[in-house]
Image (cartoon, rainbow, N blue to C red):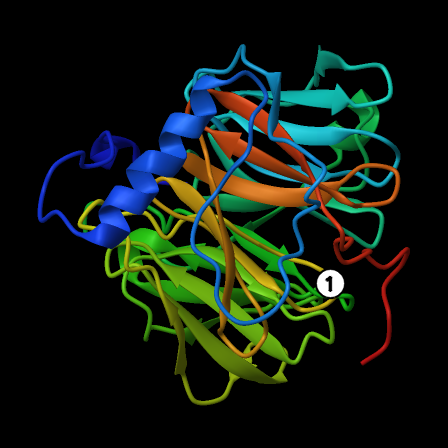
Amino acid sequence: MKEMSEMTCPQMFGTFSLNTAARYISLLCLSLPGSLALGAKSAGESPVDPDGSLVRVGDTFSLPDGPAWDGSGELVVSDVKDQSVHCYRPVEKSWKAVPIESARYSGFFVQCGTLYAADNGNGVVRRFPGMTPEQIDAAETYSLGEPDKKGKPPRPNDLVVDRQGNIYVTVTGRNEVVCVRSDGTTSVATTGVISPNGITMSPDEKTLYVASYKPKTIEKFPVVSPGVLGDQQRFAVMDDGDAPGADGMAIDSAGNVYCAGATAVWIWNSAGQLLETVECPTRPINATFGGADRKTLFIACFDGVYALPMKISGVKPADGLQAN
């Protein structure tokens, strides 16, 4: 999620190049309803289904963010500005409101049959045992550190949870990635990423990826143990102009890494080679895999939520906590 005070339209003019021209030409393709514009490709095969198209499935949001597939047939999406939460059922093509406490939720993640939420507005991470009203009321909360000199708590932006229930959270304003371990203890995992935003893990959970919002880079870390990271390495650079936007992230079962940029969702393989850029009608904010076979990439953009068929499925979460 972008900081609310910094939301600006993508830069439309600047140094003109063939690469820039190619991006604007691809954006023109979106004038056709339901069309899919694909940008630059590099070595490797794209995971995007060539027979599919980018289709908007929800448009009643002020600012959608933090999409997560709940595992039972619904996509959970936060409306950050409206401070509400909604669920989408692809089978019925219907939306419904979730009776959850009103808050500025900037990220959701489902793991071990549990919904985790980055409550940016209240400066806590929430763990919901389920989505019924009774289960929502039973949510556990975790703070991410001491308040600053002005009394403001560290505010979570986005999060990823491993199969042991350890939560990794980006705290953009403090340049921190914080780990809330499954036993409830908290520590700063790294301060090496400038304006950390999106975050995801490799399918084997041995590598943590973090999006650096303003420099527009993707950094990666080996996971030594819960909350303990190895040496930081540069994974990729989003060289798409001056507009900021290394935002929300996702990963598929083949280990391909996805990140929302200024105008497109970028896709790299695990070696950092660019496979595809999926141009979006408006600025993309975050993405996740869902659907019955987890082969739909749901993308939250400024003007709504979109669905894109994929050839590769997303990573299936654990049904319950797993041993290290």
Q: Nearer the viewer, residue 71 or 98?
A: 71
Q: Is residue 82 above or below residue 273?
A: above
Q: Position of residue 248 (x, y in %)?
A: 48, 48
At x 51%, y 41%, the residue is 286
Q: Position of residue 280 (x, y in %)?
A: 45, 33
Please tell me how crowded label 1 is: few (under 14), some (14-19), or many (20+) other residues with Cα within 10 Å. many
Q: Position of residue 278 (x, y in %)?
A: 50, 44
Residue type at numbered disc 1: Gly
Q: Quadrant of the N terminus?
A: top left
Residue 322 visible (yes or no): yes
Horizontally, residue 74 falls left or right of residue 118, namely right
At x 36%, y 51%, the residue is 154
Q: Quadrant of the C terminus?
A: bottom right
Horizontally, residue 150 falls left or right of residue 268, namely left
Residue 108 visible (yes or no): no
Q: Quadrant of residue 223?
A: bottom right
> In this figure, which residue is indicated by the disc labeled 1?
165
Q: Is residue 170 above or below residue 11?
A: below
Horizontally, residue 118 falls left or right of residue 5, namely right
Q: Nearer the viewer, residue 148 or 210?
A: 210
